[in-house]
Amino acid sequence: MVQKTDTFMLGDAFKKVDRAAWRAMVDGVLKGKPYDKVMLAETLEGLTLQPLYAADNASVEPQPAGRTGAWGIDTPHWNPDVAATNAAILEDLERGATGIVLKLAAGGTPGIAIEHLGEALKGVYLDLAPVTLLPGEDFALASEAFLGLVAARGHAASSVTGTLGIDPLGVLAQTGRLPQKLEAAIADGAAIAARVAEAPPGLRAFMVDAGIVQTAGGTAPMELGYMLSAGLAYLRAMEAAGVPLSKAVTQLSFVLATDPDMMMSVAKFRAARRLWARVQDAMDVTDTPAKLTGVLSLRSMTIKDPWVNILRATAAGFAAGIGGADSVCLMPHDTMLGLPSAFSRRIARNVQVILQEESNAAVVNDPAAGAWSFETITAELAREAWDYFQKIEAAGGAVAAVRAGLIAEDCAAVWQSRRAKLATRKEPVTGVSEFPNIDEKPLEGFGAIPVGAQPARHAVEVARSFGFHRYAEDYERLRLLSDAMLDETGARPAVYLATLGSVAEHTGRVTFAKNFFEAGGVAAHVAESDDLAAGFRQSGATVAVLCGSDARYEEEGLAAVQALKDAGAVRVIIAGRPANADNLAAHGVSDFIFMGSDVIASLSRFYEGEAA
């Protein structure tokens, strides 16, 4: 006997609306504005984001199995003071962290000395807490040291998890140098992997850090394409070393950057798992899911107003977690300033604990599954990434592409496009290009930036490095100039915002101009007098910014410019792009600032004038 089951459809309670009806309502709101320009968003990834995803325009494809349960909470450590590092590690593990990441000193870069690895891990149960090493070019020495430590403590090799972090491709791509030929370095890594693979399912030897593509300015498809090609290069090396592919895939782990762009980050992690499953299918290896780690991208972090980094970390951690990362490493909010304080480490750690324990973000496996938007963007990212993977393979694979500078060149080109969007604030940076606070209290409690104690070994292999960029870098370069002038003279560079007309007429442009200049560290003194000349002289500034309506500029602009110049203004700038701009420029206006203008270019010209 078959039991009857009643199915309740939630959508049945609502009136059916088709896309044509929805589009008609949207067009009514747009009132003649072009739909494509207003409602569609073109990304640097080559995707077109739609305002509405539904069954008629979505792309849903099978998603391979991934993580079940909570993701691992990793905490990063790179303090050369081994006693301080050990204390921080133990504190992290006692208070919510489940794994640790150790940056080791190598190639002249600072970190924990390999010979002090045992001291740094004193009191750490290596069979309970996964350890991820970042050994750089000294991966062979670091691997021997860690494997020796495991043996000395009596752990079974199969009981220890984590990764040795062997990534010669990543080292060459990131630093532009290696102390041996790239093929030899990869072969050495494969030999270590062959030893480690004898005791499954423990350690993983190779780690593909694809996040370096993102911090170089690259897109998500480029990051994923590099991940596939680099992973394939390491698999080929392990196969050549006698490791069966079924075991070789267990010796790989992948690192992807995660950032506050939640939709793109979630889709990227889902696409990564889907793409690597496709690679394994081609090798007839189907039972080993990709091991994915999400690391908060330094590209999104700022030096100024670092408190906003906590919000960035929260969004990024959430995205990586629900996107299916096996573990997530969030950088403390003061990372760009120096060694993190105990407070910032606690906040970074607790963000993940709260996401898991209070928000229950890890309760549902792949919560984005079935959502038209996430499914479609995942599929589109995967297609774009596969195309880029094929481009790398056509160039000879990851080894040849890194050596030839192909990926570095592609990253640089994309970065220039993004840099233009940042300069015009089409991509805003909260606390830096938007809502800047030039009077913010400096952060305290962090340690000095460590200096590499060991000289780099002679480079046998050199290549064009991928580079490293942050969204805020151009603005913060100007902010640091302002800080230097404050230290030297006791005052920041400044402009006087001269107003025309009533408060209602000039408030919008006063607010705009104030944010515009303070984004570069220039103090903006708002007029408190109707007498432009007297107010300017009292301000002590040498540059005036005229703020008013276009109508006022037409009626009073020329006279106002002349009055300000007679009062001693070296330069007069106008907030806006009035119809009589050419006439105003002919009578001494040096620049016009408006929505969409290049903030970095305008402020750079300002500083050049100050230095003249």
Image (cartoon, grey):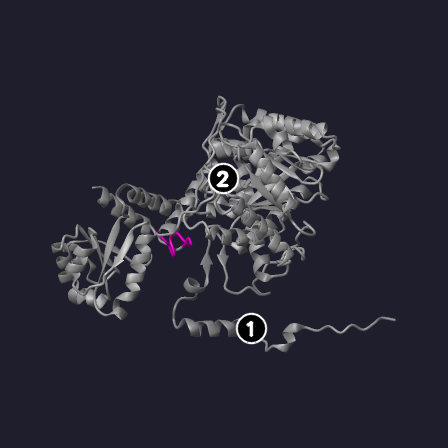
Closer to the camera, 458 or 362?
Answer: 362
Q: Is residue 154 above or below residue 44?
A: above
- Residue 586 rendering spot, x and y as whole percentages: 15, 55
Q: Is residue 457 magenta?
A: no
Specify whether residue 268 is in view.
Answer: yes
In the rendering, which numbered label is found on residue 18?
1
Q: Secondary structure at mark 1?
A: loop
In this rendering, position of residue 550 left or right of residue 290: left
- Residue 601 rendering spot, x and y as whole percentages: 30, 48
The residue range painted magenta reads: 427-438
Q: CA distance from mark 1 to mark 2?
A: 55 Å
In this rendering, which labeled residue sits more in front, label 1 or label 2? 2
Closer to the camera, 120 or 494?
Answer: 120
The quadrant of the image that shows the N terminus is bottom right
- Residue 194 rendering spot, x and y as whole percentages: 69, 29
In this rendering, position of residue 341 left or right of residue 472: right
Closer to the camera, 382 or 249?
Answer: 249
Mark 1 and mark 2 in contact? Answer it, CB < 8 Å: no
Q: Is residue 432 magenta?
A: yes
Q: Looking at this view, name the residue that lies furthest to the right.
A: 1
Q: Specify the amino acid type for callout 2.
A: Leu
- Residue 413 rendering spot, x and y as whole percentages: 42, 43
Quadrant assignment, res 558: bottom left
Task: Name the residue that disc number 2 marks.
Answer: 339
Q: Is residue 378 above or below residue 148?
A: below
The quadrant of the image that shows the C terminus is top left
Specify whether residue 260 is in view.
Answer: no
Q: Earlier in the sequence, mark 1 or mark 2?
A: 1
Q: Secondary structure at mark 2?
A: loop
Give the class, few, some or many, for how many residues have Cα within 10 Å of label 2's Cα (few <14, many ≥20). many
Q: Specify the amino acid type for callout 1.
A: Asp
Q: Please tell me which residue is depicted at 52% across the width and 51% down the height of the picture.
A: 313
